[in-house]
Amino acid sequence: MKPVTIVDTSLRDGMSSVSHQFTTEQVAAVARGLDAAGIQVIEVAHGIGIGASSVQYGFAAATDEEYVSAAASAVRDARIAVLYVPGISTLGVLDAVHQAGATTVRVAVHCTEADCAEQPIRYARERGMHVMSFLMMSHKLEPAALAQQAAKLDSYGAQVIYVVDSAGALVPSGAAARVSALRGAVEADIGFHAHNNLGVGVANALASMEHGARYLDGSLRGLGASAGNAPTEVLAAALERAGHDPGVDIFALIDVAERVMAPMMTEPQVIDETALLLGYAGLYSTFFHPAKRAATTYNVPVRDILVELGRRGVIGGQEDMIVSVAAELAGTIGRP
């Protein structure tokens, strides 16, 4: 059996929980601790991905290149990864972060749009980068259909293909079924990225590993969009208790989580009403803060907004629908 590789996303997905305001010094401190604990891949940059620092997605405290450089300078063994979302990221930005020290790129597309990943995957492979690819909102496709999309990513040259539970909507049986379907359809390794909206992020990761996933994502203290991710230190401990070698120093990970990450957090990562409803309704985790703001602005329950958005089947990139739905529910379209 191939070993499991834990990928830590605290410095990318976790950015969404701190409004992308980690400093380069904080990034270096976390990366240094993760590297010392044996984490092999550390994802860094704006929470939405490289090139996303903007009015629309929020300005980060530093540039993507500065974040990557800070992390790369702080580690001895770990690879630095970045997230590339076609339509937000550009090949020029990818070149810049590659030069700054990123050696792995994770190309993320909606689960029905694998063809959008072809250009950046081929481009990154030509430049010698290790390429992973995300099928976001994987709960929206049944396993066989998801495997068909994964086969496209495989043909483009992705070396790891992820089932990504962007909404935290999957339970272990659903996660396992999708990983199994991909395992039978591609030559690439399989990964799983959990969000914890239903409280089963670690369980989903374990089920995925048992059915063929070899890369599992986590973040220290679960820091991440909405309800957050599978906590890296908890995931590592659970893997060991399940009889697997997580390939890391669990006590060192706990130390980084408690002594480095915890003091940086603006608030504990919890499953509140909004986070739970995002998972229940199957909505993208980045809807978390905009939905709360719209509920306050239009004086309508966040529950009503999220349930209606779920009924309409909105996906990432349709954040403008949050305000539209809130206004409709309030009966004040165009008048907050």
Image (tube, rainbow, N blue to C red):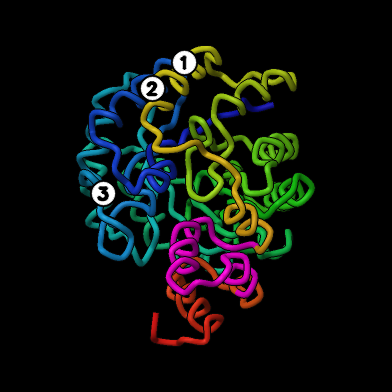
Query: Could you tell which of marks 1 and 3 lies nearer the N-terminus?
Result: 3
Q: Position of residue 93 (x, y in %)?
A: 24, 54
Outermost front residue: 299
Give the class, few, some or many, for how many residues have Cα within 10 Å of label 2's Cα (few <14, many ≥20). some
Residue 23 vertical placement versus 334 (above, below): above
Q: Main SS of the magenta segment?
A: helix
**Label 3 near label 1: C-beta < 8 Å?**
no
Question: Circle 2 sits on which residue?
Answer: 260
Whether residue 139 is visible to the viewer of this picture, yes or no, is yes
Identified by mark 3, the residue type is Ala
Q: Secondary structure under badge 3?
A: loop
Q: Nearer the viewer, residue 121 or 76?
A: 76
Query: What amino acid is labelled 1 in the image?
Result: Asp
Mark 1 sits on what residue? Answer: 255
- Sequence order check: which comes first, mark 1 or mark 2? 1
- Tell me which residue sits at (74%, 38%) in the image: 207
Which residue is disc 3 drawn over? Answer: 60
Distance (Cα) linking label 1 and label 3: 27 Å
Name the residue nearer the viewer: 232 or 244: 232
